[in-house]
Amino acid sequence: MKRILIFFIMVLGLVTSSVGQATTETSVTSIWDDPMISFYVVVGFLFVVVILVLMVALYMLQVLNYMVKQATKERSERLGIVYKEEPSFWSTIWNKSNDFIPIEKEKEIMLDHNYDGIRELDNHLPPWWTGLFYGSIVFAILYLIFYHVSDTLPLQLQEYETQVAQADEQARKLKASNPVAIIDETNVAIVTDPVALADGKTTFLSNCASCHRQDGGGDIGPNLTDDYWKNGGSIQNIFTVVRHGVQGTNMIAWEGFISPDKMQNVSSYILTLKGSNPENPKKPEGELYVPKEVSSDSTKVQASL
Ligand code: HEC
């Protein structure tokens, strides 16, 4: 009993700790905002509770059964009656579903023929086997009716298509409610908010500095502080390089590793490095990039040249 109690306490501890984790994650990841997830967690929790209650109930039932048996035995002993144990519920079911002709009676069901000493018993199939066999026939007929004749239930392909449609709809809603998720080359903009730039710096230092140096002066990757760019120096150009990488070089596509808003932040941060003149920079690579807004203003073009 003590061991069972300890087991229950351990299971409960496990369950509560996993639910605890679930709640702490709520604030961080967005999947927990999905009401279905919380629903599944609650249902899962209830399921575990029901199983535990059932286990306890079964155990209590066994104890009760044992006590009743013991009491009957004692009583019959007192009254001098021979005690005969009744077969339990399970053993009755077991015997019924394995209803063989017992070995002692095999002689009666032995067939006449005899092939080189190999003879045949006319034992019938166990009821559990025939039950499964007839059950599968019934299942097949019902399956045929529901899935192919009346079309009441969806076939796999249909099911797949509805699920894909649902997921598309969900993704569309998510995008609509969260514009950050749809930042791409077409709508990326330079951010100037200090918090966003600080975030960009953090991303840069942890992901990019190994190749572009902490100050952006360039190492394996090009110098990001000068006016020369291999792939163009507009925010769109930079964002594109960060998002898709440059094929055949060490610059990988960061999409999937860094969220779109963070890619926008780090791209904007890179633009703030312009003219920071770090010590010992990498030689300019690529072409001189002149921002479009400036090119319309002749004095500034002169200045930047
Ligand atoms: C493993 C090394 C490596 C890492 C890490 C790396 N880069 Fe690069 N990066 C490169 C190389 C090499 C190039 C040059 C690609 C080319 O030849 O066009 C490059 C090019 C670039 C360019 C375009 C420069 C130009 O002149 O057109 C930008 C912008 C850039 N990287 C930003 C980043 C950012 C932001 C990160 C971090 C999220 C990052 N890089 C991480 C190696 C790296």
Image: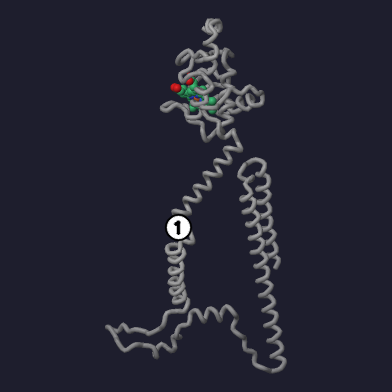
The vertical placement of 31 against 1, above or below, is above
Residue at 64%, 90% (x, y): give it.
83
Q: Is residue 221 visible?
A: no
The residue labelled by disc 1 is 155
Residue at 66%, 23% (x, y): give it.
194
Image coords of residue 118 (percent x, y): 31, 82
Q: Is residue 58 visible?
A: yes
Residue at 69%, 72% (x, y): give it.
60
Answer with the quarter of the image where residue 103 lies: bottom left
Image coords of residue 133 (percent x, y): 43, 73
Image coords of residue 206 (percent x, y): 58, 28
How many discs appear?
Answer: 1
- Identify the residue at the far front of this view: 150
Quarter of the image containing the N terminus?
Answer: bottom right
On whether ligand 1 comes within 8 Å of the CB at mark 1, the answer is no
Q: Amino acid at mark 1?
A: Leu
